Image: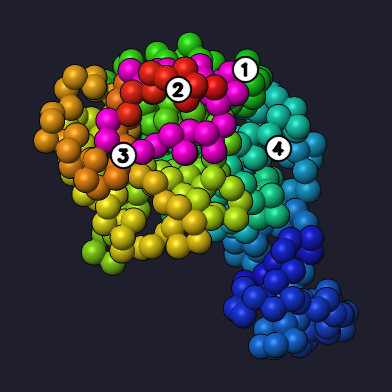
Amino acid sequence: MCYRKGNLPVCPRCHSELVLEMVVPPGSDEPRETYRCPNCGLKMEVLPKHHSISRHGVPGYRPLHDLGEARNYDDAYAVFEGDFGGHIYLTSPVRGIRCDEGTLLSLLGFLDRIAWGDQPEGRAIFYERRETGQGIRGGMGGGRATDDVWLHPEFLSLGLLDDIRSVLAGTADMSTLFPPSVEATVSWIKSGRSNKPRFAWAVVSVLMAAGFVVNWAGWKEPSPKQPKWTDVTAFLDEDANDILLAELAANDAMIGRRIEALVSARDVRGLGGKGTTRCAVFAPCSSLEVTPGTRLTAEEGNVSIITSEPLERLAPAVSGGLTAARLFSSLSGGLQMFLDDATLS
């Protein structure tokens, strides 16, 4: 594993601080900048800034220095990635990009905030020459060079593809993407039964706008080796002392199952060991559809149920200044209505 100079100078093996040295590699007469771990001895070449950690040294890798150089090639692609190459967010032919570089960086930060809660040191945009249809090496399944915008399933599951296409094409700016308008958010909540991705984005964007550090995992499928994460893990602050675990459910029967999953996740993982852990189920159905039995289960498990009506009230309240801390403290288990204006201020 190689790290670029300027990225986090910490050993990925033992997390000790790295030392920068000039080392002459075997078979070479010229010294190269190399990170060395004084604790475990691991050595890592310092890459040129425009080289991706994931693809440096891969046969056929053709990196370009920047957007300006990339615009000179019809086969150039922009590759958005985070987690030091561990997650490919987005790829797009450069010939289809009409927005400026500042907008691209804002888009990268937006995607990174959803995926990793905002890790500036681990995210970057790389420009590379690619053949159409070619896979792009990277974590979380990598990416692909296509004739159109390629978007990772994590963001597809939130219904963001068309909005991102518009931003890249220069026909919309980032302010239309996040935070979305209250009107748009409420419309997604109302249509949540038929448009699950947009309902998911309504929930995630409301929490983000309130100030939660949100990790969206609703796109992941469970496996025998890796149990399913909760759909949403929302941290009240960067220190992760107080945590909101949330699941999305379509109807009363699913709400009951999601309550069980949340109680299990809270108790088994012990995610709230440093502070308080609260749990909530978000559902696009009406509060009237939640049966007394499900309400009782939620109260006994101290899990909040937030259906369409209270969620519609949350959207303008967050836009008006409702904070994550205030919302977090108001989650008391059972069916939440948010009828008290004081709660939404």
Sequence-first disc among 1 and 2: 1
| CB within 8 Å, label 1 to label 2 | no
Residue range (magenta): 309-335
Residue 59 marker: none
The answer, for residue 158, to whether it is visible in the render is no
Sequence-first disc among 1 and 3: 1
Residue displayed at 60% across by 23% down: 321
Residue that mark 4 sits on: 105
Residue 173: % across, % down: 65, 20
In the depicted structure, whether residue 6 falls above or below residue 338: below
Residue displayed at 18% across by 42% down: 297
Helix, strand or loop at label 2? It is helix
Residue 333 marker: 3
Sequence-first disc among 4 and 3: 4
254 vs 108, nearest the viewer: 254
Residue 280: % across, % down: 34, 39
